[in-house]
Image (cartoon, grey):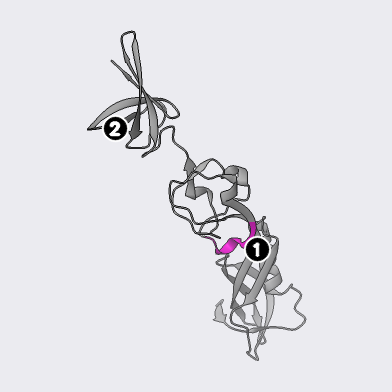
Amino acid sequence: MYEVVIASLALAAGASLEPPQAWLESELRRRYTTVADWRIRELFPQRGSNELQAERYEGGTLGARSLVLVHGRDGAGRPVVARRWYAVAGVGPGLVMTRPLPALTTLTSDMVNAAPIDLLAQPCAPLGDRALAVGMRLLQSRRRGDALCASMLAPVPAVARGKTVIVRVTAGAVVLRVEAVAQADAGIGDRVRLGRANNPAPFWGVVSAPGEVRIDD
C-alpha cells in the first residue's frame, strides 16, 4: 500500500534538486514579474536528524507566507512529504501616497509617487504608472505612504456631488444660466438632483457636459 507521511525532515545532503528556497523564488518570479528584490526566510528551520531525499517540489500557498511541499523518501525508502513554510517579501516599484487624502479627492501628480514597496504585503496589486492615477478619483481615504491600487480609483464623474455646476434653463427662445450644487454624482445623459443656497427646494436636470446641466421647458 502506498503511504504518504507528512513530516518535518531535513533534506539529505547531496540531493540532486535545488534547495526548496531557490525553487520557491523561481516560482514567485514567474508569478510576480515586477518584483526586483526577493527576501525569503524559512519560518521553521528543520533541526531533525532524519533525512529526506527530495524528488520533487510542489507549491502550496504562494505569497507573503508561502508553503513548499517537498516530496521524497526517507532513509528507509518510504515516501514522505515535508512542509516548508517561508516568510516572503517582494520589493518592487509601486505608487504610494505623498500625503493623507480623503475619499473623493481627484488625484494630481504631486499626490502620488513611485517608490520601492513590498508588493506581496499589499491587499491588491499596486499601480506602477503615475499616468494611470492622475485625474482619477479616490474611492477611499488613504494615508501618506499607503500603496495605491486600481480598485481604489474611479473616473471623475461629469458632475460630482457637492460641486457647483452651471445650469442652462431653456424656455422657448429664452436661455437662462444659473449656478447650482449637485446633490449626487452623475454622468453625461443622467438626471441629477440639484439645489441652490437661496432656494431650499431641490430640482432636477440632465447632465449635458462636464460641470453643466440642462433643464428644458
Which residue is denoted by mark 1 in the rendering? 91
Dot 2 amino acid type? Arg
Give the CA separation, mark 2 to mark 1: 51 Å
**Image location (x, y in percent) of residue 48:** 63, 90
Dot 1 amino acid type? Val
**Nearer the observer, 36 or 58:** 36
Up-down relation of residue 71 to residue 190 (above or below):
below
Up-down relation of residue 60 to residue 34 (above or below):
below
Q: Earlier in the sequence, mark 2 or mark 1?
A: 1
Q: Which mark is residue 208?
A: none
Q: In the image, is 16 to the left or to the right of 44?
A: right
Which quadrant does the C terminus fall into? top left
Q: Is residue 120 magenta?
A: yes
**Image location (x, y in percent) of residue 139:** 44, 48
**Nearer the observer, 190 or 38:** 190
Q: Which residues are magenta?
A: 115-122
Element on which disc 1 rests:
strand
